[in-house]
Image (cartoon, coloured by chain):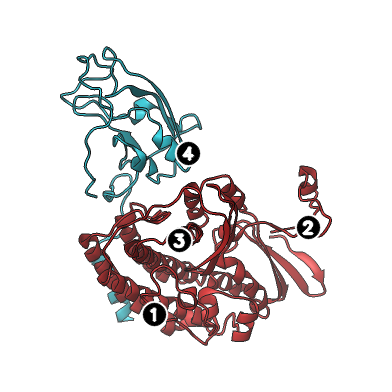
Amino acid sequence: MLQGFMTTLKSILEKPVTIQYPEQKRPVRSRFKGRHVLKRYDNGLEKCIGCALCAAACPADAIFVEASENSDENRYSPGERYASTYEINMMRCIFCGFCEDACPTEAIVLGDNYELSFTSRTDAIYPKDMLLEPVPEDGSPTPQKVPAGAFDRAIPLMQDATD
Amino acid sequence: MEIKKVDEGKFVVPIGPQHPALKEPGHFEFTVDGEIVMDAKVRLGFVHRGIEKMAEQRTYTRDLYLMERVCGICSHVHGTAFTLGVEKLAGVTAPPRAQAIRVIIAELERIHSHLLWLGVAAHEGGFDTLFMYSWRDRETVMDLLELLSGNRVHYSANVLGGVKFDINPVQTDQIRRGVDYLEERTQFYQKVVTTDNTFLGRTRGVGYMSREQAELQGAVGPTARASGVTRDVRVDAPYSFYPQTPVQIVLDDGGDLTARFIVRIKELFEAYRLVRLLLDNLPEGELATRMPRRIPAGEVISRVEAPRGELMYFIRSNGTDMPERVKIRTPSLCNWGTITSTAVGLKLADMPMLLAGIDPCFSCNDRMIRVRRAGEPGVMTWDQIKAGKGGWSV
């Protein structure tokens, strides 16, 4: 019986293994695949060029992309075209990360936000303004007016991700 | 609970379809004489999702993700079985490093599945302390899987022709540490399961299945191995990286629930050994090879050992980028037959333990087969289906 009490006493002194979730949050791993983020360049231009390769790669048909023409007066992204509509249906998405692999400009990245909730089916479709990351400090919002010929190249030089 | 009267002194106790001992839908009818079960019937099919049909309308890459979602616990082996089958059809072999990573993930998944089962089975036996302990420790292996793949449950490690992610030295160390901790804990569980008198009272001699019976009813996986049947796909027909790292089959002659506990716990040790061995001898090289988009026409049967037993995939390709037919046979389906025979003569109160003993996965095994007799039309109308005509079986 004493041994039983000892076990109880020992357990009292142990640190609890549970996490008080909404107050305390456990950091996600670096490979975690959470909600998508559409990235911008440092000058504020969107990385997405509206090629819809992500929509083609998506195993769940969750992505819808519609592209429009860029001009130097109204420039959203480098290159000829930008995504005028970019929608992800979060109820269909299976967070596999295929869109991330398919993207030629590393525009779509699965972030670390896992707290997704909606009250209706239409709310589950995340439009472009919800997915786009905020404009960086020294950038300006899109559409931008840029000097002609400065951003004609759609696909930047890239290097392999480290993790 | 509704009780149907059958004949003098005998009753039929229906259990389910909601929450019959486990948190999945299945319906059971136990004919009882007092406390003793005289007959058992199983009815499945409440979570039929039409996955096989869906697979015919998707490309192979998309199917891979669909197949991973057949089961929530053993998602990786489903992906592996499908990938191995398609790779065989296409005549492509994944690079050795990819094969080794596949096996590492499969063994980590086995650890995860067996620890989950240990918790569930202990809970059904009223031993909630063991349930909480084993689920706490299961978090260790789930964290390891999250470290590797980013996800706790659907790792999606496979791509056609290889794997998606690599294992770096830092992760190797973390996996080793996690496995060391789990091994120490598993030794404690082995001691508890084999020496705790109260728990043994619920498992020893309960649900005895002889070797002949297991073979006759086609039991697979740990359920069969606990009856002394040498049946393990990893040993019988090694796939992926198993030929290079032979598995020592875990057998027990007990045939009862205690034996099923012992077999699964010993398999945990075997999985720890394999993970360590593979991490030490991880071959260098590429992670994936090129896969053709269109798979050459042909048929293939791909078998792998899931945590619950033998998992079989049949894939028929017609030369396009979509399969013509995919048939999945999950291990739980094979083991259901053993329930109906072993239940006879046991107390009604033993039924949850007996059900948990085969580690059933309800949503895995619900598929539909139609046996078409000569002269019958191949297409049925909606009215015929609703009327239950045409020999549908689930």
Q: Is mark 1 on a helix, strand or loop?
A: helix
Circle 4 crowding by C-alpha within 10 Å: few under 14, some 14–19, many from 20: some
Check chain identity for marks 4 and 3: say if they share one.
Answer: no
Check chain identity for marks 2 and 4: say if they share one.
Answer: no
- Mark 2 and mark 3 lie on one chain; the one further toward the N terminus is 3
Where is mark 3, residue-wise?
Answer: B80
Q: Distance between the residues labelled 2 and 3?
A: 33 Å
Q: Is B83 displayed left or right of B42 in the figure?
A: left
Q: Which of marks 4 and 3 is in front?
A: 3
Where is mark 1, residue-wise?
Answer: B190
Where is mark 2, residue-wise?
Answer: B391
Give, as a three-letter code, the residue at label 1: Gln
Above or below, B121 relative to B379? below
Q: Is mark 3 on a helix, strand or loop?
A: helix
Which residue occupies the extreme bottom position in the image? B253
Is B194 or B254 nearer to us in this picture? B254
What residue is rendered at 79% in x and 44% in y?
A: B383
Tag 1 subunit: B
Answer yes or no: do the residues labelled 4 and 3 have beta carbons within 8 Å? no
* Residue A9 in view, yes or no: no
Which residue occupies the extreme left position in the image? A138
Q: Which of marks 1 and 3 is in front?
A: 3
Q: Is A107 displayed left or right of B393 in the figure?
A: left
Tag 3 subunit: B
- Find residue A29 and report its horizontal and vertical position in percent: 27, 51
Q: Nearer the viewer, mark 1 or mark 4?
A: 4
Q: Quadrant of the N terminus of chain B?
A: bottom right
Q: What element carries label 2?
A: loop
Tag 4 subunit: A
